[in-house]
Each structure stands twice: as structure tokens, then as C-alpha cells.
Amino acid sequence: MKNRNKYFTIVAIAILLKFFLFTFLVNHAPQSRFQSDSVDYLETAQVLVSHGGFAKTNTDGSLSPEFYRTPGYPVFLAFLLGGLKFSLNGVILLQVLLTILTAWITCKAAFLVDPKIVFLSAVIVLYDPPVSIFSLQILAETLFLFVMALFMLSFISYLKNRKFNMITLSALLLAAATYIRPTSYYLGWLIVIFIIYANIRVYPKKTIVHALVFLLIFYSLLGAWQERNYKRFGQKSFCAVVQSSYRYFGLYKSYSRNKDAESKGMAPAAYYAKTTVRSFLYLMTRPGPFKYFKSKILSAIGNALAYPWMVFWLAGFIIGFIKCGRNIYYQFNLLIIAYFIAASIGGVSLLVGERFRVPMIPFIAIISAYGWLGLAKTGLIKE
């Protein structure tokens, strides 16, 4: 009973903090609800409501079909703003609730892996500053995080029981996530390889069937949108945002367009090595952009607490990474994390930051909780 009260208090404080940040931002810094991407999302959502198409409005009132972004988040906004008549603050409040629900989903996934890591996994998701901060903005991050957490739960369930319905659900959820944020487009191939790696020695025939089913469902669903793009734009791409990012901001062939003062004049090999390391550190160690609250006091308190918190989960993650061994569930989580790290650094290089870490948090939380559990077993800390 004593532990239950302690756990309840920790979770309650996290939820109260989320609602406090929501109230503070909408009352004292309402302009921070919007970033540059927000304009595109809201415009395409408005056209979906008024005209039923994924497009933007030209200056003369005509419509131009949208190719740059994917329709997942605009459809979400259109349903809430147009269908349910939510206000923008109502949308943001729902996103806050989705972060809490994501922590619960992480609990369910962690329980399948090891019941002892359930509570800490949820706490890491609940208290993560970027998860809370970006849920307060009209951005796709929270919806993407939520659906990726569902994908994590369904795929871990598949690894647990090898049921056909779970591999089907996993493919559907990953496709839905990719329609929200196209970053996960190539993840489908890695999941197919992982299905084969995890099962081929025990269930060779079933494994091939499951891998092919996942591949077929996932890329057929994405292919439907690519077919739409080909018919309207003569382009076979899923969307233009990924290609644009890699072309103008990505790490690949960035040496010739490098304008960073710290790496000017370096030899190519040294430049790419240093840029990769710096990008990795930006991605994994930036604590959270408290500047959006427009309060020096809140920013100071936030940063003072966020840095020790970042050290806490990162230390657990490093220990968990070292200890995971051949555990198939932790290997799966590490695969997803590695993919998003590579995609983020490859896509935007030094522009990467804590925003790109958000979809990794449920996967990171399970590894970090496992790391701290391992440390507790050594007797160095209390479990």
C-alpha cells in the first residue's frame, strides 16, 4: 500500500505538471502554440474541411493539391476542428491527454517485456520535457509519438505470441504513423528483416509468410498515396518533405555546402565525423525548449530540473544498451531507436534537436528502465 501511494503521487505530479504547462502556455504565451510547420497543417486541415481534398488555397481562391507533406496530421486536425468543432486549445489539450495515454501504452508494452520495468518506463515518458512541450504546439509530434507507441505495443505482442493478427496490426499502425510523419517510410524494410531474424530458426515457413504479409500491407498502404502523387504530380515519391530535407539540410554530400564555423576548413573525413558526433549529441542530450513559455523563471526552473533528468534517463539507457544482450524485445527497441537516430541525423544534420527525439521516447524508456533495474540488482541502488 505504501508503494502504491508513492507511485500514485509520482504519476499525479507528472500529470499536474502537464496541465500546469498547458494552462501557462495558453494564457501567457499563446503564440508559442504555432511553429512554421503549424501554418501548413492548419491550412491543409481547413481545405479538408471545406473542400474535402488535401490541398492548399492559392491567392486567386483556386486549390493546389499538396505534395510537400503527408495527410495524417491534417486529417486529425480536420476531424477535431471541423467535425467535432474543437478549439485550437481543445486540440492541444487532447494532445496532452495523448501523452498520458502514451505512458499507459508504454506500461502495457513494458509489462510484456518485464513487469519490473513497468513503472519506471511510464515515469520516463510522463516526465520527459520535449514530450510535454511539443504536445502544446500544433505539430505532428504528439500524434506520431502516440501511434508509434501503439506500434511498439503491437509488435512486442507479436514477438511474444507470433500471432498473425498482431503482425497485421503492426503493419497497419506503422503505415498510419508514416502518414503522420514520413520519417518511418524505410523502417518497414528493417522490420521485415527483424521478423526474419527473430523467428526464422524456430518457425521458418510461418516467418516468411509473416514477413511477406507485413511488407505487403505496409507498402501497399503507402503505395496508394504514392500512386496519387504520381497521377497528380508525375512524382513517385511518398512526399516531398523528406527529399527536400536530405537535399538541403542532410548529412549526405553536405561538405560542399557547409557553412558551420566550427567545421570550416576541415578535411572531408574529419568534417563528417565531427558533424555526425555533434548532431548525435544535439539529438540525445538537449533537455527541452523551455523558451517557448516566454518566462525567464519557468525556463530557469525547467532547465535546472531537465538537465539532471536527462542525465538520469540517459545513464539508464547506456546501461540498458550494454546489458540487453540477445533479448529480442530490447533488440527491437534498440533497432527503432537506431533507425530514428540515423534518419534524423541523415535528414537534417546539425539542425537536429530534441524534437526529433520525441518518437523514440517510449522505446528509450523501456531500455532505460531495464538499465536501472540491472543496476538495482547489483545492490548499488535500491530497487
Image (cartoon, grey):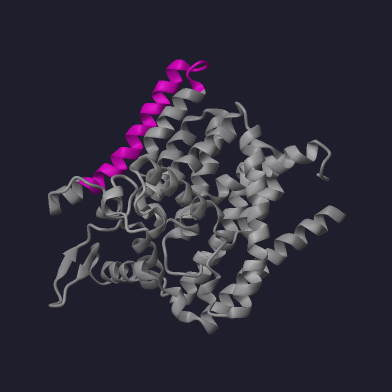
Viewer-side residue, 225 vs 161:
225
Q: Is residue 181 magenta?
A: no
Viewer-side residue, 359 vs 155:
359
Residue range corresponding to the magenta coloring: 199-226
Q: Residue at x 54, y 60 (%)?
A: 131
Question: What secondary structure predominates along the stretch shown in magenta?
Answer: helix
Q: Determine if residue 266 is in view.
A: yes
Locate the N terminus and report the quarter of the image it occupies.
bottom right
Considering only vertical position in the picture, is 184 above or below 168? below
Q: Is residue 202 magenta?
A: yes
Percent coordinates x, y for residue 250 in the rendering = 33, 50
Q: Residue furthest right?
A: 2
Q: Quadrant of residue 79?
A: bottom left
Percent coordinates x, y for residue 80 in the rendering = 41, 68
Q: Residue at x 35, y 54 (%)?
A: 264
Percent coordinates x, y for residue 179 in the rendering = 35, 51
